[in-house]
Image (tube, rainbow, N blue to C red):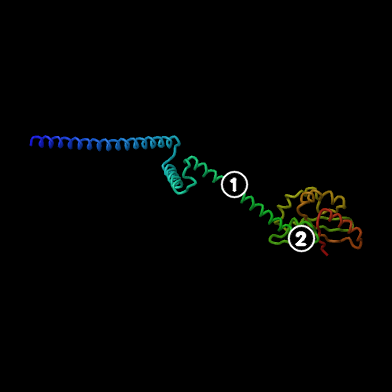
Amino acid sequence: MANLRERRRQLLNLTITEIILIILFLVLLIAGSLIKKNQDLKEQNKELREQNQIYKNLDVDALQLAEFQKFKELIAELKEKNGEFADMDIDEIVSELVLAKENYQEIKDKESEIAKLMDKLKDYEEAKKLLAYYEERFGNDLPPCWTKKGTLAKVEYLYDAVINDDGVILTNTDSRYPHRIKDRKNLPLGAVTEGVVLNAQQFLNQTKAVFVLNKETCRHYLLVKDLSGNNKNHFKKYLSAIEDHFYKYEDK
């Protein structure tokens, strides 16, 4: 009987010891977990303090900070959903995004250049059609420098030219085209003498500058009136001089 009591006492002591050990083990596990969490919190807090210091150094405001945080969240989402970016650091992703933006801008710039070239090509095609029209309409290979606004073929004349027995007399067309007065002032016409008789060489010398100015792009027109009587050779001589520097329309 005494032995039975002794064995029960020993068994009870062993059970209590085991329970105490189990409790101590659980306490250690809990303490370890709490220590780990505390360390994690300290690391997070340290990271936040560092980021906060960076933001202070960058002198960013609350709105910029919110935008940056949104940017970080978008990158995190990108890393989570896109396998291509999953193994990349944030710096690498930012570099890729910046590069993509630069490439996109280059593409947009090239598209803009192509659009400009297409516009130039369109202008060139329109110019070809216009030249063909003028050549068919007037028999000339350059367009008029002055045309009535909104029209292709309504010529506005630079001068009225009267060929008489003595030579040619030039009169400006300001009264007929008052909207061209400013345009006329911008032309090299300072050497041209109006309202007096010019011989053929004087005419050519005085109108050379305006001819050279638009030699490759357009040609000014003169409205020519023949008052030379029956002297056709005289008339043809001055008409030829006019055609050296201008296109002409004969007012018959």
Residue nearer the viewer, 149 or 181? 149
Question: Of the residues shown, which amino acid type is indicated by label 1?
Answer: Glu
Spot occupied by residue 181 in the image (x, y as percentages of width and height): 72, 54
Quadrant into which the N terminus falls: top left
Residues 191 and 117: in front is: 117
Give the percent coordinates (x, y) of residue 54. Answer: 43, 35
The residue most toward the bottom is: 252
Above or below: residue 160 compared with residue 18: below
What percent of the width, then of the height, locates residue 194? 80, 53
Q: Position of residue 246 (x, y in %)?
A: 81, 55
Residue highlighted by disc 2: 132
In the structure shown, which secondary structural element does the residue marked by tag 1 occupy? helix
The secondary element bearing badge 2 is classed as helix
Residue type beneath disc 2: Ala
| 226 is higher (above) or lower (below) than 23 | below
Residue 140's disc number: none
Question: Mark 2 against mark 1, which lies toward the viewer?
Answer: 1
For the question of whether residue 175 can be seen, the reply is no
Q: Is residue 6 left or right of residue 106?
A: left
Residue at image position (72%, 52%) is 183
Look at mark 1 in the image and give the residue it sits on.
Answer: 106
Quarter of the figure with residue 240? bottom right
Residue at the location (46% across, 47% down)? Answer: 78
- Viewer-closest of 247 and 34: 34
Circles 2 and 1: CB atoms closer than 8 Å = no
Question: Vertical placement of 130 versus 34: above or below?
Answer: below
